[in-house]
């Protein structure tokens, strides 16, 4: 089976500034190379991910880092305003995200899995489910025009693969270097490699891409599941 992203509009919706790099940047890079329009929406500021030696104005630092990473990918970037640990399925983020969808008009949304270990990630899963639906609802008014149909949703792998049963894999072997370059932009988080409570990001990303690749018979892969919900799944 050959997956072809040509003509698609693919958006990743993630909680924190480095989540896309770890979980779906290879797929976004592949989609772009095949002719898709791509975007990343980061809902949290990332201001609480402090290294052992705290960084002043970390939220602003991480915003600059995510912009640099999006530029490596050539992705349009949308950013939310919620603090780390403060994101939840509520009306304000629902309206914000539905309007983001109406602005970018994605055909496919990549989002965190509902059973992810992190509360912010689980909130993203719930918000994407609701906001994709509302983005195509004429009764839900935002600043931008309603979509003709909700985007399809793929749930992303979890960090370190905990509790995630892949439904399919995307071969990203040729785009692993893009993931590397994007991750290198997140210097504030790479500086936490020696923190006892934090997994070093570069080895984690390489190991996970390699493990998912080994499972799929390729050098490097990213794992997903479809969101099998009415109007949020497609035949490809």
Image (spheres, rainbow, N blue to C red):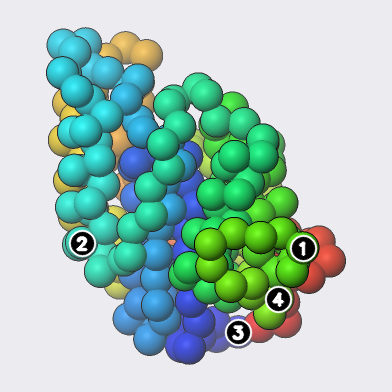
Q: Is residue 110 above or below residue 164?
A: below
Q: Are marks 1 and 4 in contact (CB under 8 Å)?
A: no
Q: Are marks 4 and 3 in contact (CB under 8 Å)?
A: no
First along the sequence among labels 1 and 2: 2
First along the sequence among labels 1 and 4: 1
> Which residue is depicted at the point 39% across and 64% down?
39
Location of the C terminus by quadrant is: bottom right
CA–CA distance in space, label 2 to label 3: 31 Å
Q: Secondary structure at mark 2?
A: helix
Residue under numbered circle 2: 71
Q: Are marks 2 and 4 in contact (CB under 8 Å)?
A: no
Task: Answer yes or no: is residue 190 visible.
Answer: no
Front label number (1 vs 2): 1
19 with respect to 87 (left or right) = left
CA–CA distance in space, label 4 to label 3: 26 Å
First along the sequence among labels 4 and 3: 3
**Residue at far right of view:** 230
Task: Give the percent coordinates (x, y) of residue 8.
Answer: 50, 82
Residue under numbered circle 3: 1
Front label number (2 vs 4): 4
Q: Is residue 104 above or below residue 154?
A: below
Front label number (1 vs 4): 1
Q: Quadrant of residue 196?
A: top left
Residue under numbered circle 1: 139
Residue under numbered circle 4: 149
First along the sequence among labels 2 and 3: 3
Q: Secondary structure at mark 4?
A: loop
CA–CA distance in space, label 2 to label 4: 29 Å
Task: Give the percent coordinates (x, y) of residue 60.
Answer: 21, 33
């Amino acid at each position: 089976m050959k997956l072809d992203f040509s003509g698609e509009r693919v958006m990743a919706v993630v909680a924190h500034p480095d989540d896309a790099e770890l979980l779906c940047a290879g797929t976004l890079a592949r989609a772009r190379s095949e002719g898709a329009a791509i975007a990343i929406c980061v809902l949290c500021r990332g201001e609480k991910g402090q290294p052992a030696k705290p960084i002043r104005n970390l939220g602003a630092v991480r915003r600059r880092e995510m912009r640099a990473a999006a530029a490596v990918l050539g992705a349009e970037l949308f950013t939310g305003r919620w603090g780390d640990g403060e994101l939840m399925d509520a009306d304000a983020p629902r309206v914000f995200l539905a309007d983001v969808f109406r602005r970018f008009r994605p055909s496919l949304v990549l989002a965190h899995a509902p059973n992810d270990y992190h509360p912010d990630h689980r909130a993203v899963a719930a918000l994407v489910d609701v906001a994709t639906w509302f983005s195509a609802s004429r009764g839900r008014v935002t600043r931008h025009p309603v979509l003709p149909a909700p985007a399809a949703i793929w749930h992303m792998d979890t960090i370190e693969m905990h509790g995630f049963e892949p439904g399919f894999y995307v071969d990203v072997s040729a785009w692993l270097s893009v993931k590397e370059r994007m991750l290198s932009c997140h210097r504030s988080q790479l500086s936490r490699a020696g923190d006892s409570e934090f997994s070093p990001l570069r080895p984690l990303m390489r190991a996970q891409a390699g493990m998912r690749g080994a499972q799929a018979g390729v050098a490097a892969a990213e794992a997903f599941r479809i969101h099998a919900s009415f109007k949020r799944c497609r035949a490809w």
